[in-house]
Amino acid sequence: MDPQPTAATRPIQLKIADDIRMWIESGELRPGDELPTLGEIMERWACSMNSARGAVSLLKSQGLITAGRGKAPRVRVPPARVVRSSERHQAEKDLARRPERERSSVGEAETNLGMSIQEQEFTTKYATIEADESLAAALNVATGDAILRRTYKSIDPHSGRLLSFSTSYIPVGIVSGNPDLLDEQKEPWPGGTMHQLSTVGVEVMQIVDEVTGRMPTTVEAQAWGLTEGIPLLFCRRISLDANDRIVEISDAEYPADRTELRFITPLRPWRKKRQVTHKEDQK
């Protein structure tokens, strides 16, 4: 969409914010460039200090600029983007059949973040919980059934900000045949969940990804280092076996300004139509 002002009658602070936004969208102002000062805004648009500050606040709420106490507002520099593709599900399944040396060298840290797990502060926490009504319905189990909840967190040691965060839920009955799968000290597991499930005879045959979004809480915004106006994406991955039994649910969150969700859907070809002869067509 070409840069365009907000429709309908606009208060002066919205007109100012619109004008600056269109400079950003057209490339007249580039990432990292300083915005006009409050004094320059007041002079250019013949407005009050409150209106100038209101315009800057609107730009900040749209996630277009960064500004803080004692810092000049600048056009926001987009963070490095991470691609999360549905193609990785097959890659993870294939990896589960490879030797441990190969499995241990490739994981979500390498595929999603482009960095080794040694470069992160990686933590895992396991707990056995009882399924509440919501979780029981999602996993198709009875309320009160034992569920293994696994929480994974990676932090950038340099900035202290989150790199990844997810929570996995597996019915304990599915994995109880291998005690190692109930031990958080075994993490990070070479080959991940696909390989873990394979040790108890479970093969994942289908994965469903569900994506929603909302604005972050102040705690979430601080943990991820989000600027104002940037939402979080919430991705639920549902893994099913050959009998359509749900074997795991994994909930992960991703900042919308640095995540690209890419869904690859192979389509089966149509069956070829049988050639119809002229005589058959006459009937």
Image: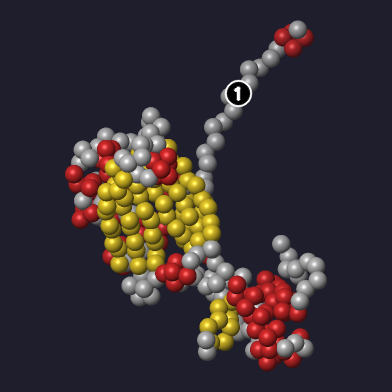
Q: Residues within 10 Å of mark 1 (few under 14, many from 20)?
A: few
Q: To which quarter of the image does residue 132 belong?
A: top left
Q: Is residue 197 above or below residue 85?
A: above
Identify the residue position indicated by label 1 in the image.
Answer: 272
Q: Position of residue 22 (x, y in %)?
A: 71, 73
Q: Amino acid at mark 1?
A: Lys
Measured from the top left, where is residue 152 in percent x and y? 33, 57
Which image quadrant is residue 39 in? bottom right
Q: Number of numbered discs present?
A: 1
Residue lying farthest to the right in this orientation: 9
As helix, strand or loop, the secondary structure at mark 1 comes to: loop
Q: Which residue is depicted at the point 45% across and 49% down?
A: 236
Q: Where is residue 70 shown, x and y percent of the image?
A: 52, 89
Observer-nearest of 228 and 30: 228
Q: Is residue 206 visible?
A: yes
Q: Of 219 and 244, which appears nearest the observer?
A: 219
Identify the residue at horizontal 54%, vertical 32% (top origin): 268
* Quadrant where the C terminus is found in the figure: top right
Q: Quadrant of the N terminus?
A: bottom right
